[in-house]
Image (cartoon, rainbow, N blue to C red):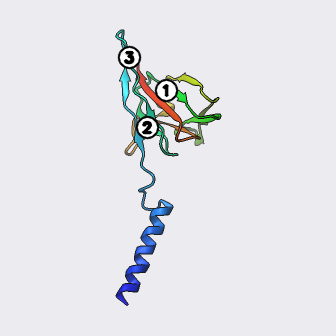
């Protein structure tokens, strides 16, 4: 009797894990922002490894250098959590062809930053291909 209950509970936990209900599969990345100055720097790239994208600290002077190493077009989304008059502001989306590189930004914190919770003051970028897109974060202030 105790064994069958243990098996049922174990099966439920495994199912919840596989469905992401426990949150283990939804690990969120946070990128490191590099300061730009008159001295040359080597970009530090992070690979977007999950569909939740990468959050980065956005001071309004942030730029992203995005590289698409996929063999196909990738669709990028910079989330805009802001609302005006109860209406959601559309996310900033752009397309990158195979092998393309792009610089995008700056991002107005009033539109792009999360306003509460764990990621307050941060902005999110996500990609349709989570294995082949890398991004470096810069701030010129």
**Pointer 2: residues within 10 angstroms few (<14), some, or many (20+)?**
many
Q: Is residue 46 above or below residue 20?
A: above
Residue at 43% over, 79% down: 8
Task: Identify residue for label 2.
Answer: 55
Instruction: Give the camera-side residue of 92 and 13.
Output: 13
- Determine which of the numbered discs, if any, sits on residue 108 in the image: 1
- Determine which of the numbered discs, if any, sits on residue 41 in the image: none
Label whose residue precedes the other's in the sequence (1 or 3)? 3
Q: Secondary structure at mark 3?
A: loop
**Pointer 1: residues within 10 angstroms few (<14), some, or many (20+)?**
some
The C terminus: image quadrant: top left
Task: Identify residue for label 3.
Answer: 36
Instruction: Give the camera-side residue of 134 and 21.
Output: 134
Q: Is residue 86 above or below residue 111?
A: below
Residue at 40% over, 43% down: 116
Residue 9: percent from left, percent from top: 41, 77
Are discs 1 and 2 less than 8 Å apart at CB?
no
Label whose residue precedes the other's in the sequence (3 or 2)? 3
**Pointer 3: residues within 10 angstroms few (<14), some, or many (20+)?**
some
Q: Secondary structure at mark 1?
A: loop
Q: CA distance from mark 3 to mark 2?
A: 19 Å
Residue 89: percent from left, percent from top: 59, 36
The N terminus: image quadrant: bottom left
Q: Secondary structure at mark 2?
A: strand
Residue found at the far bottom of this picture:
1
Residue at 62% over, 35% down: 74
Residue at 52% over, 46% down: 51
Q: CA distance from mark 1 to mark 3?
A: 18 Å
Q: Is residue 32 above or below residue 3?
A: above
């Amino acid at each position: 009797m105790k064994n069958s209950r243990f098996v049922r509970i174990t099966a439920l936990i495994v199912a919840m894990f596989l469905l992401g209900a426990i949150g283990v599969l939804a690990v969120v990345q946070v990128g490191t922002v590099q300061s730009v100055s008159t001295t040359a720097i080597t970009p530090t790239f992070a690979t977007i490894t999950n569909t939740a994208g990468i959050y980065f600290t956005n001071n309004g002077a942030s730029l992203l250098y995005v590289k698409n190493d996929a063999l196909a077009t990738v669709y990028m989304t910079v989330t805009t959590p802001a609302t005006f008059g109860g209406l959601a502001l559309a996310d900033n989306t752009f397309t990158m062809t195979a092998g393309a590189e792009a610089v995008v930004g700056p991002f107005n914190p009033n539109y792009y930053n999360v306003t509460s919770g764990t990621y307050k003051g941060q902005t999110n970028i996500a990609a349709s291909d989570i294995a082949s897109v890398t991004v470096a974060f810069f701030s010129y202030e």
